[in-house]
Image (spheres, rainbow, N blue to C red):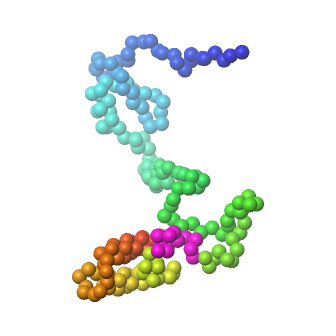
Amino acid sequence: MKNKPTNKFFRETISSPKKCDYKDCLEDGIYSAPKSPNSKEKYFFCLKHIKDYNKRWNYFAGKSQNEIYNFQKNDFFEGRPTFPFSQGVNSKIKFEFSFMFDKEKIQFKERGKRFEKSYDLGFNNEINDSLRLFKLDHAYSSNDLKQRYKELVKKYHPDVKNNIKNKEKMIKKINNAYKILFNHTKFR
């Protein structure tokens, strides 16, 4: 037996348009507006009066100071979109978990000691290349980075007279590497 489509979702209301809910207005109220926040009751206004209503709308009308404060305090977290880790959304925050997922056994297991000394886990190729260019190790500080940057710029600056070729290219590489490493130090 086939399912018959129900008409309750597709019912058209054939009625005369509602009049504007504004006092003494005789125009058709074709624009709806809520009577209060989180209310299903609606006003119907004409274009002129819906604009006035929207200008005067106050979401916090009827709420106490404590409710307004709690809304503002929690809205920072509640109004943000969330993404599951499975989508692989990149984050600037480097999470270091003490457990890892073992794909062979399909379970989580605690990381061994061999992972503690592996510094390459949080570094990508750009950062490793930049560290090689600056001749820094993975435990560099921002002061080490700045000092090494100044030395390299003095050496490869185009205005300095020496027999080094392609100074302009090298300065671009140095500046790009400095930018990458400087941004990386912010999020370590």
Q: Please identify the quarter of the rendering in which residue 55 is found.
A: top left
Q: Is residue 137 left or right of residue 110?
A: left
**Residue 185 in view:** no
Q: Residue at coordinates 47% horizontally, 33% vertically from top-left?
A: 39
What type of secondary structure mainly makes up the magenta span? helix
What's the residue at 32%, 30% (across, down)? Answer: 50
Residue 149 drawn at (x, y percent): 36, 81
Could you say which is closer to the camera, residue 159 or residue 185?
Answer: 159
Residue located 65% across and 74% down the image: 115
Q: Is residue 59 above or below residue 70?
A: above
User: Any magenta on residue 128?
Assistant: yes
Magenta segment: 119-129
Position above or below: 186 against 50? below
List the single residue furthest toward the bottom: 162
Whether residue 136 is visible here, answered yes or no, is yes
User: x, y percentage for residue 151?
Assistant: 35, 86
Q: Quadrant of residue 103?
A: bottom right
**The stretch drawn in magenta includes residue 188:** no
Relative height, residue 100 to residue 56 (above, below): below
Q: Residue at x 29, y 32 (%)?
A: 51
Q: Nearer the viewer, residue 185 or 177?
A: 177
**Number of residue marks:** 0
Q: Could you tell me residue 148's position as x and y percent?
A: 39, 84
Q: Is residue 82 above or below residue 155?
A: above
Q: In the picture, which quadrant includes the N terminus?
A: top right
